[in-house]
Amino acid sequence: MNDLRDRLQELADAATRDGTTPGPAAAIRRGRRRRRWVLGTVASLLAVALLAGAAGIGAVADRSAPALGGSATTRPRRAVPSRPVPVEQTIFNDLAREVSRCPGGASGEVERIGYVRSRTYRRIWMAVAKAPAPEDTGICWTSGVFELDGAGGYGGLRRPKPAATPLTASGTGGRTASIEGQVAKRAVRVRVRFRDGRAPLDLPVIDTGSDYPVNLYVGFFSQGRPGARDDTEYWAPSEVTALDAAGRPIASCTVGPPWNAPTSCPGN
């Protein structure tokens, strides 16, 4: 018992020497500090979690989810280039404007009735027309010769061409020249003879369809002769003849230069 009392006294003396024993206030302070540490730790953990979550959401959004109202990561759309207008369409438009000025025609609609593209001479020939009405005695049609890039020319048109004429002829000059015209429906080919003795040129007839009382023909050929000053001095064709299926002549006429035509062939 005495030993216990002595031990308690030693503890009391040590407390008096080293400082006062912590009371209730100290315990309360320790409790507050502990709660602040716990709350701070939780807040820090929540902040880390939120940052990590935000980083994860951002990574997902960059990969798959566009922002509302549009995505900054969307690639700009490329402009679709317009297709170039084919040269044949440009040629048709030019010729159609001429034919549309011609009076007559069953409906006034202009259509293509002949087309030839020559690889050898690198030329395009096209004819357009308006189908005649039953009471019409002429046909509104015109044609032109063009290079493959669309450069070329065509004759003007102000009045219908007589439908009763069985064979016409006109042409274009140059080293590469052409001859063309309308021909009776019963003809199957047109033969062109030349002044320089070369072999005749037999041209197939171009069928214009049942709405038109005549067909068409066209041919390309080379010109020029030794001693000629230029390619306009010499006009090679001399005669044109329309032939039926049996080879019999339907109509024939002589042709002269298209710019000075002492000819018996009616022109276009």
Image (cartoon, rainbow, N blue to C red):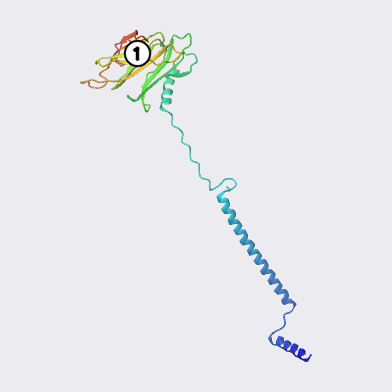
Location of residue 126 (image quadrant): top left
Residue at coordinates 60% horizontally, 56% vertically from top-left? 54
Vertical relation: 188 (above or below) 79: above
Residue at the bottom extreme, as displayed: 2
Closer to us: 41 or 153:
41
Residue linked to disc 1: 190
Residue at the left extreme, as displayed: 227
Residue at coordinates 76% horizontally, 89% vertically from top-left? 4
Count of number-bearing discs? 1
**Kind of residue at disc 1:** Val
Percent of width and height locating residue 55: 58, 56
Percent of width and height locating residue 95: 41, 21
Residue at the front extreme, as displayed: 246
Vertical relation: 46 (above or below) 173: below
Closer to us: 152 or 11:
11
Quarter the C terminus occupies: top left
Q: Residues within 10 Å of mark 1 (few under 14, many from 20)?
A: many
Q: Is residue 57 left or right of residue 139?
A: right
Q: Is residue 118 left or right of residue 42?
A: left
Vertical relation: 199 (above or below) 50: above
Location of residue 50 (image quadrant): bottom right
Q: Is residue 194 left or right of residue 124?
A: left
Percent of width and height locating residue 53: 61, 57
Q: Secondary structure at mark 1?
A: strand
Vertical relation: 250 (above or below) 149: above
Quarter the N terminus occupies: bottom right
Percent of width and height locating residue 242: 35, 11
